[in-house]
Image (tube, rainbow, N blue to C red):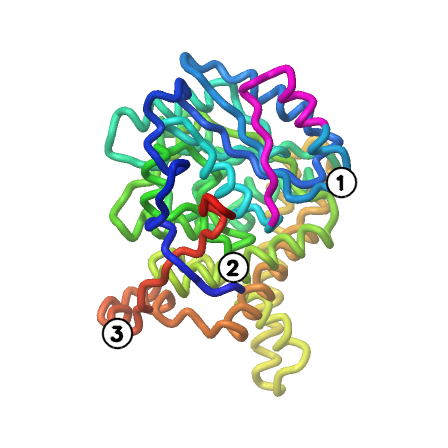
Amino acid sequence: MGGPERDARDVNGSEMAAASGTGVDVSVLVPVLNEERHIRESVEAMRAQRFDGEVEFLFADGGSADATKAILLEMASVDPRIRVFDNPRARTPSGLNVCLRHARGEYVARMDAHTFYPPGYLADGVARLSRGDTKWVSGPAVPQPTGRVSRAVALALASPLGRGGARKWASEPGGPAEIELDSGVFAGVWRREDVLGFGGWDEAWPQNQDAEMAGRFLGAGEKLICLPDMAAHYIPRNTLRGLFRQYHNYGYYRIATARRHPHTLRRTHALPPAVTITCLAAIAAPRPIRLLARLGVLMYAAALGVATVRALRSAADPGDALTLPAVLLAMHMGNGVGMIRGSVKMGPPWAAIATAAGQAELTERLAPEPERVWAPSLDADA
């Protein structure tokens, strides 16, 4: 993981000037890489936003090997609202910062090319920001599955075992009009000056970069708001291998985020590494510990069984529910292995563990020194 090199809040220059007078109200920031199959559909969905103002769509291409950039340039030639830039570092946070550097709107919104946003996403986000008391407004993530494993992921995220303590997933019908989030966030809408004031996206975080930035907002006492009406649909992984890899990366960078921002670690984050260690101990630990671990594995298996029975009631295809245990295991083991690997490589997040345990005095003693945000793509000459 690259170390912080500079504080993005020190950036100056013409492209960092105030956005007033540009005629643009909202800049949509979209990092892209090899999105040829769906990019036209994604852009059309973005352009369908119902917003009473001027919107521009900024795309940062990370060196796509397919026709993604050519398609975007073609669309930009007939729609001046579309602007296309290169993202030489090819990472998601770098692409977001490239777009942020060129953004001309008073507000900015992150959108992903493989996610579909409701027509009122921008309008609702800007309206809620305008009411005050928050600098970050987002919507819940709604799975839009495409295959059996993908559908089982949707079932998993509808269950406490798959959702954990995160509140960014779709809320129940009849729930509150808005939800206050912790660092578990899904994109969002902000004032441009606020994102710049907090340093932009840290480019040392190829995964979980929104959670890391949320940690900075929360650490400054800001409130993060989720509006159910801003729910966005995304396509979950459709292979167990891909799902394991995804959650492994989440776990690894969850440790990095917890080390920098101890307040972002929830007690429920302990479940994946606990499951992973218990499964390993059930195989290789000394006999007394191995017996206890096997009891723990049986309890975990029973919890998977209960989740499966409940999923059978709502699943359109029983086969999707029967795939649920494998999906939950891939999510938990992937996340657990990632967190363990992160703790070994970077060191355990002791201050975060103390925070989750409610040990405020110990947290204060173990709290890390503030780190600068590494955001080189915000430089005008990047």
Reading the image, the residue beneath label 1 is 319
Provide the residue designation for mark 3. 365
Could you tell me the amino acid type at mark 2?
Answer: Tyr
Q: Residue 114: x and y, percent? A: 63, 34
User: Is disc 3 in contact with disc 1, using a CB cutoff of under 8 Å?
Assistant: no
Sequence order check: which comes first, mark 3 or mark 1? 1
Q: Residues within 10 Å of mark 3 (few under 14, many from 20)?
A: few
Mark positioned earlier in the residue sequence (1 or 2): 2
Magenta residue span: 71-88
Q: CA distance from mark 1 to mark 2?
A: 33 Å
Q: Nearer the viewer, residue 220 or 18?
A: 18
Mark 2 crowd level (few <14, some 14–19, many ≥20, 10 Å Cα): many
User: Is residue 351 toward the left or the right of residue 140 in the image?
Assistant: left
Decide: is 242 above or below 225.
Answer: below
Residue that appears at 62% across and 73% down: 294
Q: Is residue 317 above or below residue 12?
A: above
6 to the left or right of 232:
left
